[in-house]
Amino acid sequence: MSYRIEYQWACWRLAPTPGRGAVPRFVVAIEGGDNNLRDAVTGKRSRSWDVCMLGSAAHVLKTAVYFAGACEGGSLKPGSRNCSPEAYIRRIRRLIEGDEAAPAQGHWYPRIRVPESHPLASYAQQLALGTSREQRYGDWFVRVELEAAQRDLVFDFADRFPDLQAWQLAEVGGLPRT
């Protein structure tokens, strides 16, 4: 049976502004991978950084509670160890409530990709945002292009469309791998 291993966590805390709904917003990235996938060149377990939680503290903790359910069944092992759901939620709560600065390396950026039929695709057109179509694994998706000044729209999308996962709205780059 395979399971997901989480190796590292990074969190960006964005100060409240009117554009962000006047509450702090968070972008939580996690380096992880499946235990049974190996890099063909190095032989090490494959892993990558993904934005896994995004939005207000309440939204991030709601996602953490959802992920914590996988700890109970053994399909999620932070640090490659068994973990109780309560301990996982505490880990994420400490991450977003901590006073640590943003990661010294790396950055997050909006990268919105949704199925063509998702309501966000038509909403983006109503806002006159740039969109493009792309095909992935035989399915058509819409990519929404945001300019630097529109970056905070990603949080509006997260609030407006709670069915979207954080990795559909943002990506990270430049973070160190283990």
Image: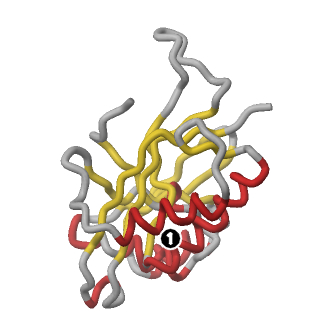
Q: Residues within 10 Å of mark 1 (few under 14, many from 20)?
A: many
In the rendered view of the protein, which quadrant contains the C terminus? top left
| Residue 7 drawn at (x, y percent) | 47, 39
Q: Check the image and report above or below for 91 versus 75.
A: below
- Image point (26%, 51%), residue name: 107
Comparing 10 with 140, the one in front is 10
Q: Is residue 125 above or below residue 80?
A: below
Of 23 and 9, the residue lying toward us: 9
Amino acid carrying label 1: it is Val
Quadrant housing the N terminus = top right
- Report x, y in % for residue 113: 51, 56
Q: Position of residue 21 (x, y in %)?
A: 36, 88
Q: Which residue is mark 1?
A: 60
Q: Between 117 and 27, which is closer to the camera in this rendering? A: 27
On the rendered structure, is 82 left or right of 20? right
Residue at the spot 45% in from the left edge and 67% down from the top edge: 54
Give the secondary structure at mark 1: helix
> Does 125 appear above or below 28?
below
Question: Total label count?
Answer: 1
Query: Picture coordinates of residue 132 (x, y %)?
Result: 46, 56
> Left or right: where does residue 105 sit relative to residue 34?
left
